[in-house]
Image (spheres, rainbow, N blue to C red):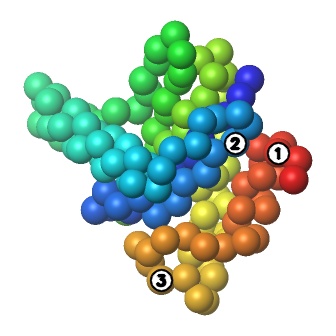
Amino acid sequence: MTINSIYILNKAGTLIYQNDFGNAEKLSHNSYIRLGSTFHSLHAIASNLSPVSGSSSGIEVIETEAFKLQCFQTHTGIKFYVIADPNHQQLEELLHGVYELYTDYVLKNPFYEIEMQIRCDLFDYKLNRLLGVRE
């Protein structure tokens, strides 16, 4: 079961973190930004399509034959989403683990400015350990 990519979007839909794992095809920086903002827009549209007011939280899972996309949105509007093998289970738990790492190693970093690009080596290291990636 392979994790292909992890994305983190701020509440405005700006891509603040992206990392590819395994043999995922590398894209240009602009393509990653475009993917992040497209997902943010689709998530916002989906949250407004619910027939019952306030009952939808947007896109949580997209499953295809080629991949599975799982999203976790925090109460502050930060979106974490992962693209993985379609047979991968427990992606929700994985995203909660990534969120814990984000709160422990990014938000508690005195040099990190909220809503800005995440550039934290310790976060990258712990994320790789969580995913079992060998460096």
User: Looking at the image, can residue 75 be seen?
Assistant: no
Helix, strand or loop at disc 2? loop
| Residue 64 percent location from the top left of the image | 47, 14
The kind of residue on which mark 1 rests is Val
Left or right: residue 25 versus residue 49 is right
| Residue 27 percent location from the top left of the image | 51, 44
Nearest to N terminus: mark 1 or mark 2: 2
Residue at coordinates 31% horizontally, 57% vertically from top-left? Answer: 13
Residue at coordinates 38% horizontally, 43% vertically from top-left? Answer: 35
Mark 2 burial class by Cα count in 10 Å: few <14, some 14-19, many 20+: some
Helix, strand or loop at disc 1? loop
Residue located beneath label 2 in the image: 21
Q: Residue furthest right?
A: 134
Q: Classify the position of the N terminus by image quarter.
A: top right
* In the depicted structure, whether residue 115 falls above or below residue 35: below
Mark 1 burial class by Cα count in 10 Å: few <14, some 14-19, many 20+: few
The kind of residue on which mark 3 rests is Glu
In this view of the protein, which residue sits in the foreground, 9 or 103?
9
The kind of residue on which mark 2 rests is Phe
Residue located beneath label 1 in the image: 133
Contact (Cβ within 8 Å) of mark 1 with mark 3: no
